[in-house]
Image (cartoon, rainbow, N blue to C red):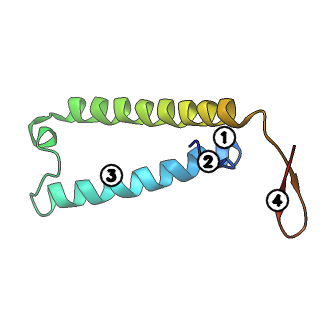
Amino acid sequence: MYLIKHMYPSFKSGFLGTLVVGLAYLAWVLYLGFVLDVWVYGIMKALSGAQFGLFFFVIAIFFLFFYIIGEKINNKIWSSTKYIKTATKVKKVN
């Protein structure tokens, strides 16, 4: 984070992309658990239906929290650096 400025997309598209990857991972974990009876996380085997839903809701809130915090930290560290975007490359302006 201190070495390179990350260019974040809009919040909506950035979080949507993160959500898609998270749901794909969730689908894979659930496939392994329910079809092959191999639970990646042992706690998931012991949860009831309502607990299972609550568990994933809490995890989704953590993902949202960490996405927002990462964006804020990135903007705080790099807010004083200005860049000019040209047709072929980005130049740093002092």
Using a 10 Å C-alpha cutoff, classify the residue at mark 4 as few (fewer than 14 neighbours), some (14 to 19) or many (20 or more): few
Question: Is the C-beta separation of discs 4 and 2 under 8 Å?
Answer: no
Q: Are marks 1 and 3 in contact (CB under 8 Å)?
A: no
Q: Which circle, 4 or 1, is nearer the viewer?
A: 4
Residue type, numbered disc 1:
Phe
Q: Which mark is residue 48?
A: none
Residue drawn at 35 percent across, 56 percent down: 25
- Tag 3 residue: 26
Q: Residues within 10 Å of mark 3 (few under 14, many from 20)?
A: few
Q: Amino acid at mark 3?
A: Leu
Q: CA distance from mark 3 to mark 2?
A: 18 Å
Q: Residues within 10 Å of mark 1 (few under 14, many from 20)?
A: few
Whichever of callouts 3 and 2 sits on the residue coming sooner in the sequence is 2
Describe the element under mark 1 as helix, strand or loop. Answer: helix
Front residue of 54/9: it is 9
Q: Determine whether 9 is above or below 74 in the image.
A: below
Amino acid type for the residue under numbered disc 4: Val
**61 to the left or right of 8:** left
What is the x, y in percent for residue 37?
A: 9, 58
* Distance of label 1 from label 3 (alpha carbons): 22 Å
Q: Which residue is mark 1?
A: 11
Q: Position of residue 47 (x, y in %)?
A: 14, 34
Residue type for callout 2: Gly
Tag shown at residue 90: 4
Give the spatial CA distance, label 2 vs label 1: 5 Å
Question: Quick one: label 1 or label 3, which is nearer the N terminus?
Answer: 1
User: Which mark, by number, is residue 14?
Assistant: 2
Residue name at image x 69 percent, y 49 percent: 7
Q: Is the C-beta separation of discs 2 and 1 under 8 Å?
A: yes
Secondary structure, mark 2, is helix
Asked if residue 64 lies left or right of residue 33, the reply is right
Q: Earlier in the sequence, mark 4 or mark 1?
A: 1
